[in-house]
Amino acid sequence: MSEIYLWLAFFGLMLVTIVTRSFFLLGGSRFDIPETVHEFLRYAPTAALIAIVLPEILFIKDPTSQSFQIEIYSSHFFGGVVAVIGYLITKNMLGTIFLGMVAFTAARFLI
């Protein structure tokens, strides 16, 4: 592959990235989003965070069969449960992170 093709690919990917990420900004205020869509979008970050974190907490990969199994006696699960309970009691994000990490670390040594 010649150098010109690499530069064309680089600038082409850059252009595609700029257009797709700035599509809503380039459109300005011409798009009116209904109130129900606004209401649904309020929950999108929470749903994305749950979709990323929950499988990591609940599932353990079995090295022999290479399949995922639900494991509630793991340090990940214990740290996650303590973090959720800590957040429900304190409503403090820094305290939640601290409690979850302390519980996770303690569980790693005890379980």
Image (spheres, rainbow, N blue to C red):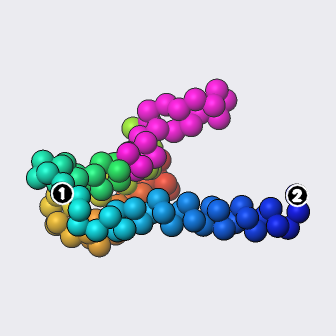
Extreme top residue here?
Answer: 65
Q: What's the residue at 49%, 54% (across, down)?
A: 108
Q: Secondary structure at mark 2?
A: loop
Residue 46 horizontal/vertical position (percent): 28, 53
Specify which label sits upstream in the sequence, 1 or 2: 2
**What is the count of numbered marks?**
2
Q: Which residue is mark 1?
A: 32
Tell me the amino acid under the disc marked 1: Asp
Q: Residue at x 43, y 42 (%)?
A: 55
Front-most of residues 2 and 37: 2
In this image, 12 relative to 79: left or right? right
Q: Which residues are magenta?
A: 51-71
Does dot 1 land on a helix, a strand or a loop? Answer: loop
Query: Is residue 68 shown in magenta?
Result: yes
> Does 54 lie within the magenta span?
yes
Name the residue tied to disc 2.
1
- Amino acid type at mark 2: Met
Residue 25, position in %: x, y?
34, 68
**Is 90 positioned to the left or the right of 2 in the image?**
left
Q: Is residue 60 visible?
A: yes
Q: Name above or below for residue 44 compared with residue 8.
A: above
